[in-house]
């Protein structure tokens, strides 16, 4: 579905094409190198409506990419990835034939941090002829589709996240399982397969079963959009209400460049109603020790 809108006097030819019933839109009729405060406000309106948006045929230089990203908040380096020493807020990832830097697990960026990523802005510098698509999932819809008893339970829980997949398991954070978006006021699930380790208020075995259900539920096909890349496309998404992952099915070279808007303040949808899980030590409770230690240190 395509529609022409005029939300800024400087973008009279803006065209928005919705990509799925759940989320995603392609935006044409704007030059990202010319974006100022008015255009940035329009882009944020579109992002809060569609959750992930794509700008084909842009092909920004690294400095133009950084300048564009700076319109939306504080840019910071990615703590899990190698950085450009001249541009610490900018990074590039390369993969060949599916080997290399490929984010092929469902995740929301940097939930292992106390203040995770707000927005990610990605430039598809080079893409294979086929394969390597990226999927995003709508966490508003994932929450909304839960039964009322499960909504009530989830809103009273929190989860431990860590950077174990990036060889830094001691970098941890606890976030609510259900959060409220600071702009839209909507509730969304906030657990993911890549970073979320444990439901704080449940035993290890209970948490394993419940997290497995939530992470499967959150990425059901009906909550997703799949995007096929062309070189020069800029994508921007809201990490507070989405998850994403790359389909690692491609041959040839795939190069992305990215900046990250950091500083998310995660707001729980409801006050926690339960104490952290605690049980007397035994041979079966060694799995609880990372949580206990983190809670003690915090």
Image (cartoon, rainbow, N blue to C red):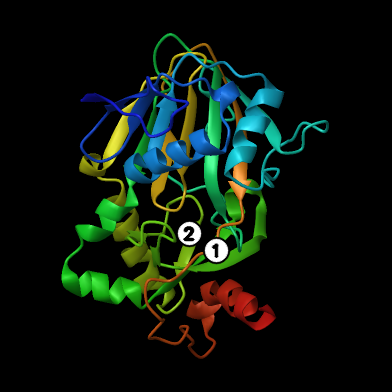
Residue visible at 46% across and 83% down?
277
Which quadrant of the figure has residue 143? bottom left
Q: Nearer the viewer, residue 246 or 44?
A: 44
Residue 5 on image: x %, y %: 31, 28
What residue is pinned by disc 1? 265
Q: Is residue 227 above or below residue 81?
A: above
Residue visible at 60% across and 45% down?
261
Q: First in sequence, mark 1 or 2: give its number.
A: 2
Residue 117 on image: x %, y %: 56, 50
Which quadrant of the figure has residue 238? top left
Marks 1 and 2 sit apart, C-alpha to C-alpha, by 17 Å
Which quarter of the image is occupied by the C terminus?
Answer: bottom right
Residue 34 is marked as: none
Residue visible at 49% across and 87% down?
278
The residue lying furthest to the top in this view is 129
Q: Is residue 277 above or below residue 186?
A: below
- Is residue 42 visible in the rendered image? The answer is yes
Which mark's residue is nearer the viewer, 1 or 2?
1
Which quarter of the image is occupied by the N terminus?
Answer: top left
Left or right: 290 in relation to 134: right
What residue is pinned by disc 2? 196
Q: Secondary structure at mark 2?
A: strand
Residue 18 on image: x %, y %: 27, 30
């Amino acid at each position: 579905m395509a529609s022409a809108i005029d939300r800024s006097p400087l973008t009279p030819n803006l065209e928005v094409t919705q990509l799925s019933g759940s989320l995603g839109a392609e935006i044409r009729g704007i030059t990202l190198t010319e974006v100022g405060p008015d255009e940035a406000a329009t882009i944020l309106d579109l992002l809060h409506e569609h959750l992930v948006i794509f700008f084909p045929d842009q092909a920004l230089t690294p400095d133009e990419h950084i300048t564009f990203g700076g319109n939306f908040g504080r840019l910071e380096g990615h703590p899990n990835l190698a950085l450009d020493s001249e541009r610490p807020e900018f990074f590039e990832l390369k993969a060949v034939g599916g080997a290399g830097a490929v984010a092929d697990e469902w995740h929301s960026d940097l939930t292992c941090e106390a203040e995770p990523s707000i927005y990610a802005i990605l430039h598809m510098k080079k893409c294979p002829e086929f394969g390597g698509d990226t999927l995003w999932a709508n966490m508003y819809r994932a929450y909304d589709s839960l039964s009322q008893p499960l909504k009530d339970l989830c809103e009273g829980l929190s989860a431990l996240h860590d950077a174990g997949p990036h060889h830094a398991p001691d970098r941890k954070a606890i976030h609510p399982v259900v959060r409220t978006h600071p702009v839209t006021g909507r509730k969304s699930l906030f657990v993911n397969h890549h970073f979320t380790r444990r439901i704080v208020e449940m035993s290890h075995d209970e948490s394993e079963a419940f997290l497995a259900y939530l992470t499967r539920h959150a990425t059901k096909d009906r909550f997703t959009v799949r995007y096929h890349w062309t070189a020069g496309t800029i994508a921007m998404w809201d990490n507070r209400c989405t998850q994403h992952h790359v389909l690692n099915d491609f041959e040839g070279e795939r190069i992305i460049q990215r900046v990250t808007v950091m500083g998310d303040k995660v707001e729980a949808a409801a006050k926690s109603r339960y104490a952290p899980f605690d049980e007397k030590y035994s041979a079966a409770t060694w799995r609880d020790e990372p949580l206990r230690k983190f809670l003690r240190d915090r």
